[in-house]
Image (cartoon, helix red, strand yellow):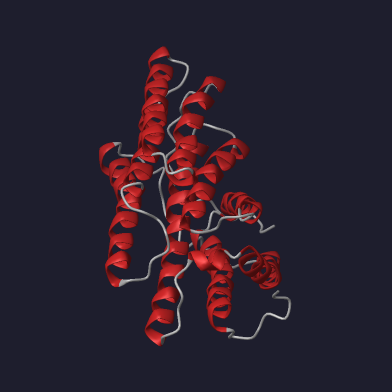
Amino acid sequence: MPETAPAARVDTDPVRTHPIALVPAVLVCGAAVALFGFLVPVLGYAMLAAGLVAAWLCDRSGRTSRLAPDLLLIALGQAIISTMPLAADITWPAMVRFALVLGAAVAVPFLISRFVYRDHVIVFPWRTGRRWTRTQWIYLVAVVGAGWVILPFYFISSGVYQNWPTVTEPSEIARLFVGVNAVGTWDELFFVCTVFALLRRHFPTWQANALQAVVFVSFLWELGYRSWGPLLTIPFALVQGYTFKLTKSLTYVLVVHLAFDAIVFCVIVYAHNGWPAIFPFAP
């Protein structure tokens, strides 16, 4: 695993925590399963509302502090995302819709946190002032190697590549490339720099990481990573959160993610067209 880097600027105001805080957090993060996994918005919104009310009661009782405001930001992000279908679509109107909605899901929590709450919990640490270590480079290469071996088997043997549109024309392939990389970048801005960061304020890292992984994997499920995809996406979400905790570098976790997504892009194109023929282990 990558070595620790200097901490980015974060809000240092102490908050009160209590084990009971897990109840509202599980409700808010678990709502993603209903919203994006089972596509039952009524249940998802009810869970969000129940979680926020429970968080407010926890704060009011004095057992916790600032739990409700922070969970509200996570709930707002999920609610914004849920306003559109997440099925992969690379038509121009769909790409514009994705950009606006997913952009708002990051921007709204950030702006409220910074200008209403006036804190620095949500930050995007592009630069840490420290060069990558040998361990980080080895890990990056290992991720690419693992993706090269595993992803063709997953996408083709399960048939989930069909959840992405058939791409044959150069313009379609170009839009798929942009879309895959844009969503991969957004993943880290929302799930790691927003959801994970807010949860770490109230919970131990392992709990915060598990909670953000629930939201992350639910989103990826609706996006198209189905069948036995969670066996891949759950470890990926957990490792990305843990890597960010160690490196405190958005740049590094983003490079890891986009390197992995480069393999995803090539596999989808290969599954539809038979090229690029760079996957000797493909079924």
Q: Quadrant of the N terminus?
A: bottom right
Q: Quadrant of the C terminus?
A: bottom right
When the figure is inspected, residue 205 is found, relative to residue 138, above or below; the finding is: above
Give coordinates of residue 263: x percent, y percent.
Answer: 59, 73
When the figure is inspected, residue 88 is found, relative to residue 53, above or below; the finding is: below
Residue at image point 68% right, 72% down: 141
Give coordinates of residue 165: x percent, y percent.
Answer: 44, 71
Counting labels gives 0
Name which quarter of the figure residue 142 lies in. Answer: bottom right
Give coordinates of residue 31: x percent, y percent.
Answer: 45, 36
Give coordinates of residue 280: x percent, y percent.
Answer: 72, 81
When the figure is inspected, residue 203 is found, relative to residue 232, above or below; the finding is: above
Could you say which is closer to the camera, residue 102 or residue 138?
102
- Tell me if I can see residue 79 in this picture: yes
- Tell me if I can see residue 8 in this picture: no
Could you say which is closer to the camera, residue 226 or residue 59?
226
Of all residues shown, which one is farthest toward the right? 281
